[in-house]
Amino acid sequence: MSAGVAAFLGGARSRLLPASVTLRFFAAAALFHLLAWLALAAGAAQWLSFGGGLGWPLAALHLVTLGVLGMTALGAGAQLLPVATLQPAPGWRLLGSLWWLYTAGVLALAWGMGMARPPWVAVGGSAVAIALFAWGVLMLRNLRGARGMPGVVAHGWAALAALVLVLASAASLAGTWLGWPVPGRALALGVHLVFAPYGFMALLVLGLSFILVPMFALSDAPAERDQLVSCGFAVLALTLGGLAAIGIAPGLLWLAALAAGAIAVAVHLRLMRTALRTGLRRELRRSFALVKIGWAGLVASLALALALVLEVPLPRLQSWFGVALIVGWLLSFLLGMLQRILPFLAALHAGGTGRRAPTPSSLTHERALAVHFGCHLAALAGLALALLADSVVLATAAALIGAAGAAAFCWFTATVLRRLHGSRA
């Protein structure tokens, strides 16, 4: 085991949040994963011709972005950033309260979007915004005293800056649904579409990858200088994309943003490839197959974004972009990581004074993960076929297969929690 991994494990054990706090974020993410596929199945006909506005496709999108990705980011960030910064973990009682507020807010927001009820959207969106803002303040306090891992810390700072723009643009968009005279809806939408998936979510994913991938592969962490180079190009890409989104030289700046983003991704993936190639653990199985699918989805999303900028006349190009970005990249990557993080954290919590810690593999459920893996790939392929054939039947079938896989992932999550409880008892 490398010195970096050993140091990380020691830091993780000394800064563990209570299991009831951290693991509830990941359990909720698994449930929202199931709800997202069911919402997409309910709005499959709308999704094929979706051009924006309230409805079940929008609800499904936010159940993934806020419910799965956001919930995982909040839990992982609260647990892992203190390890990276060598700071105390944030107050667990406040985090527990934020979980309740955030969970209720996502449910109300998704219901309001699916049923086209703007007051529910306003109530749910307000709760989500308050929870995210409070979480951001906790992380800000943690990052201010950072003493380690400057590459991860830089990604954390950039993610928090992007979160501010995401919350501001989301508030503007919610106001238009309520009929308020909010100017610049198109600008707010452009900013939101840039800084939500590629800003807040992506920067946290890329930054925490410098902890998680070497840890699970048992390799040395990438050089800090290379991490900062990747972060710098990512921030440059977001800055240029944000300026293009508000109408400043869009023809030129979109291309420049994509070029900077491509460099950031190339550097990041080179570092990840080196970590996997030099790691002591080579058999990472289905979890890292999903991670690699996620990386492929990230590259594909940039290629499709370029096609959108160049106005390539391909049918349903925006839908292809959305599938590659949300399902192909972010969802695949996080589900792959989550099936490693859950048993790993559970094993850390299960070990204690006078108790021998169980191995993560003894807490997991391989059959459930195998079912989820097959269903996830089938659902992703089914969505692609539905777009090609313009078929509501295929879209509905893909969503239902995805829901079956999500149910299997819930089964896996419940098994980890049950075995953790049994080992501690």
Image (cartoon, helix red, strand yellow):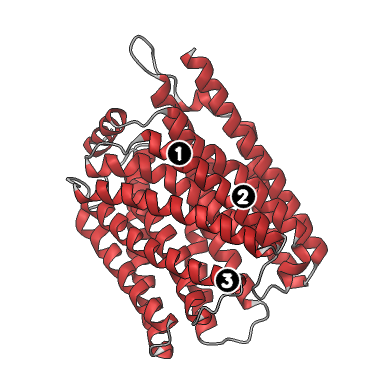
Q: Specify which label sits upstream in the sequence, 1 or 2.
A: 1
Q: Which mark is residue 321?
A: 3
Amino acid type of disc 2? Answer: Leu
Q: Can residue 333 be seen at all in this image of the molecule? A: no
* Separation of residues labelled 2 and 3 (CA atoms): 26 Å
Q: Looking at this view, is 304 or 63 the one in front?
A: 63
Looking at the picture, how far across and down is residue 199, in whole percent?
40, 64
Give x and y (percent) for residue 124.
57, 55
Is 180 displayed left or right of 129 in the figure? right
Left or right of 354 in this view: 4? left
The residue lying at 41 percent from left, 60 percent from top is 200
- For the residues labelled 1 and 2, the Cα–Cα distance comes to 16 Å
- In this rendering, the answer to whether 222 lies above or below 175 is above
Residue 254 lies in what quarter of the image? Answer: bottom left
Q: Amino acid at mark 3?
A: Phe
**Residue in the picture at 40% in, 24% down:** 349
SS category of the residue bearing label 2: helix
Picture quarter containing residue 205? bottom left
Task: Please indicate whether residue 154 sits to the left or right of residue 293 in the image.
Answer: left
Image coordinates of residue 6 in percent, x first then y, are 26, 32
* First in sequence: mark 2 vs mark 3: 2
Contact, CB < 8 Å: mark 3 with mark 1? no
Q: In this orientation, which residue lies closer to the viewer: 254 or 195?
A: 195
Q: How many marks?
A: 3
Residue 97, numbered circle: 1
Q: Nearer the viewer, mark 3 or mark 1?
A: 1
Q: Is residue 102 left or right of residue 209?
A: right
